[in-house]
Structure formats: structure tokens, C-alpha cells
Image: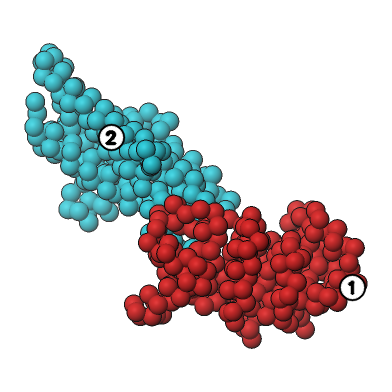
Chain colours: A cyan, B red
Amino acid sequence: MDLQALWLTVRLAATTTFLLLALGIPLAFWLASTRAHWRPLIEAITTLPILLPPTVIGFYLLVLLGPHTGFGRFTARILGHPLVFSFSGLVVGSVIYSLPFAVQPLAAGFRAIDPALIEQARLLGASPLRTLTSVLLPLSAHSIVAAAALCFTHTIGEFGVVLMIGGDIPGATRTLSIAIYDQVQDFSYAVANRTSLLLVGFSALALVLLYMRRSGNENPHA
Amino acid sequence: MPDINIQHRLGRFSLDVEFSPQNQWTVIFGPSGAGKSTLLRIVAGLIQPDSGRIQLGGRTLLDTVNRIYVPVGRRSIGLVTQQPALFPHLTVRDNVAFGIRHLDRDRRRDRIIEMLRLFGAEPLADQPANHLSGGERKRVALARALAPAPDFLLLDEPLAGLDDDSARDILSSLLSLRVRLLYVSHDLAEIWRMPADVILLDSGRVAAVGPLQQVLATHRAQLLRHLSL
């Protein structure tokens, strides 16, 4: 088992999940509440990573974050190193790749809340921020947990985007899924099996916890 | 110039009303689709009308000519509808506290208890809002709307479904307050003894306005027909 890859993968998934919740909650709130004409466009852009092949996302991010674009040179100057082939670059790629897995459940959770509750909060003088923190977030707790679990497990299983942006640098960009690929290339099937079982366990556990919580919410008086 | 003067189009329906609430209570009667709820939502600030002017308690809340628009929540207006819309994750106490501002902790606590007691809901203070019965929810919704001491309270059939005794109790409690009411009702008996003006709304227009007995004398058939719908 490549423990270095395991630790890096967990760090990447945790950082990505945190950033996606911070970014996804206001974005989903806006999507769920706005009547702007360009909402479908923004919603389509946030959902696009589900449909695009990971290698396509990885390729364009590799170009964008590399030294041949103004943005790539700018971030390299700020960070002191290029984003490509670095942990920070993996985080950027993971956030973009997993964005729909945060925004979709969050927006669905916000939309499921009775609009009369939001109206009452506004009538009682609550600002949009207070409405979000005092009404929407507590009533969307299940959606937030679902979004976090999906982002975490989805990031843990990433392969294409990670390989394109980060390559395969031990301790810097080699995640568990890339370690499995390396192990198979080396014909170390037993090690690859153990690593794969760990990923299966991660995902299964996250889903079981998620559905247990959902069952609890559906039967509060059971 | 009337205090409330609103023109608003919603698809094929248009609302064009003007009146000045003279009494403590103004009761709006009218058939379904007359525009009663739309009128209340415009006054509350939940809908921005195409044009008009709203002046209540000496404050201009809306004036489309002069581009004045006081946002919802800053109008000192409460709204209670048939659906109490209590925050289900909060206790009754926290629901009532939600809109109270600018009070220290002690005065805030006293205000919550005062409002709950007024509507006979004090024993419910620590219960989760989603554990209440329909009638209890209506009482708490009224207490919550009145807790911030609004200048104006808008009621859209808040007593629908309550038994006569409960409705009478709640009306007496409301009457004991100085708050001015704009009250959509279907029940003539409910407001018979109230110091109320009546507005008869029909297809988005004011068909009659004035003291109840006066409107009843001139529009009896129309009023009774609407109330029987």
C-alpha cells in the first residue's frame, strides 16, 4: 500500500470538499433563488464537468495553468511555482471537476424549501446572509452532507484530470487511483487489489452513511 | 391623494386599486381571483407593482414616479397567511424572536412571552415548531409577526379552519393591540363588531369602500354573493 499516496489523496479530497462547499453554497443559493435570464447558462457551465471526459478537462486545465498562458504565468508568479504538476494544481482541477457534485444537491436542497419560509424571513427583516445561515442552511443539512460526501468520494476516485494536470510525482501529485495504475503496470496485482478495495470501501461507507442519514430524516418520529 | 394606489398587471389579470385605510382595521372582501392576496403582497413589498404609491403611517413605502422603494423587511409590516410558515427547525420561542431587533436580552425575552401570552401560546414556548397542531401554528405565526411591533399587519385569512371560539379569541387579542390591520376575510360575522372599514374588491378593482354597514347597505347582494363563493 502506498501510504504517501493515501495521505495525499485524503488531503486532496478534504481540501477540495471544503473549497467546494465554500464556493458551492453561495452559487447554489443564487441558482435556486435567481430569476436572471442567464441562470441556465451558469447552471449548464457548472454541470458541464459531469459530461466532459476527464482527459478533456485535464487537457484544457493543463494548457490554462501552464506557462504558455497569461493566467498560468500570473499564478506561477504569485505562488512561486507553476500550478501544473503541483498539489495546488490538483486542487484547482478537482474543484472544477467535482463542482456539479456540490452544486446539484445543494441547489436541489435549497429549491425544496418552502418559499413561504424565505418570504417570512425577509418580512421579518432578515438579510440574505441571515436567511441563508438561519433558515436555508439548517433546513438543507442533508443536502450539505450529501454534497460533501459526493465531493469527497468523487475526488478520491479521480484519475484522468489528476494525471493530466499533475502527472505522477510521488508525494506531490500521485494519488491512490494513479498508484493503482502504476501497480497494475508493474503487474503488482495483489497490491493494486488492496488499494482498490480501500477505494471501494471509502465510497461504500460514504454512501451507507449518507443513506442512513436520509432514512433517519425521512422518519424523524420512528 | 389616496394612501394606497397600485397598478399591476399579471398576465391577463390587472390590479388597479386606490384607497386610504381610515380605520384601525380595513377588511378586504372579494371572490377568489379578485386580487386580494396580490394586493397584500404588493403592500408587504414581496411584489413590485408596475406603478403606484403606498404611504402608510406617514412613511412613503413605494412611489414609482419618484423611484422610492422601501424593501421588504424594512417596511415595518407583518404578513400572516393561511399557511403559518413557521421555521420548522426552531422552537416556538426562537420563531417569535426571529424578527425582534434592537432590544436587549431581557426586553426581548419579555416581548416574546408577552406575544405568546396574548395568543394563548405561552406553554408552547419551548416546543419545536414542527410539533404544533394547525391551530397552534396560526397563533404562533401571529405572535411572530407582531413581535417586532410592526406599524401595519397584513392578514390573509389567517383564521381559516379555526373553530369559532378560537377565532373570536384571536380577534379579541388583535383588537387589544394598536396595530393597524389590512385583513382579507371571507367571514362577515367575524368582523361584524369590529371598528373596520370594508373594501369590496372585484376583478382587480375596488367595487365599494367604506364602513361595513354602509357598504352592506349599498352592495348587499354583491357582498353576500362573494362571501358565499
Residue B217: which disc? 1
- Tell me which chain the residue with mark 1 is part of: B
Residue A188 horizontal side relative to residue B123, left or right: left
Q: Nearer the viewer, residue B228 or A189?
A: B228
- Figure quadrant of residue B103: bottom left
Circle 2: element type: helix
Q: Residue at x 61, y 73 (%)?
A: B172
Position above or below: A161 against B86: above
Q: Nearer the viewer, mark 1 or mark 2?
A: 1
Q: Chain of mark 2?
A: A
State the image coordinates of residue B199 (x, y, percent, origin top left): 78, 71
Q: Which mark is residue A209?
A: 2
Please state if A106 lies on the left or on the right of B81 as rendered. Answer: left
Image coordinates for residue B208, horizontal then vertical, percent: 85, 71
Q: Are marks 1 and 2 in contact (CB under 8 Å)?
A: no
Q: Residue at x 20, y 53 (%)?
A: A79
On the rendered structure, is B159 left or right of A103? right
Q: Horizontal and vertical percent for residue A65?
A: 29, 44
The amino acid marked with disc number 1 is Ala
Estimate how packed mark 1 is, as few (under 14), some (14 to 19) or many (20 or more) residues with alpha carbons within 10 Å.
Answer: few
Q: Quadrant of the N terminus of chain A?
A: top left
Tell me which amino acid carries mark 2: Leu
Question: Residue, x 76% and y 76% (percent of image)?
Answer: B197
Left or right of residue B19: residue A118: left
Tag 1 secondary structure: helix
Which residue in the rendered view is the most extreme toward the bottom? B58
Q: Position of residue B42 (x, y in %)?
A: 66, 66
Q: Is residue B123 visible?
A: yes
Image height check: is B82 above or below B207?
A: above
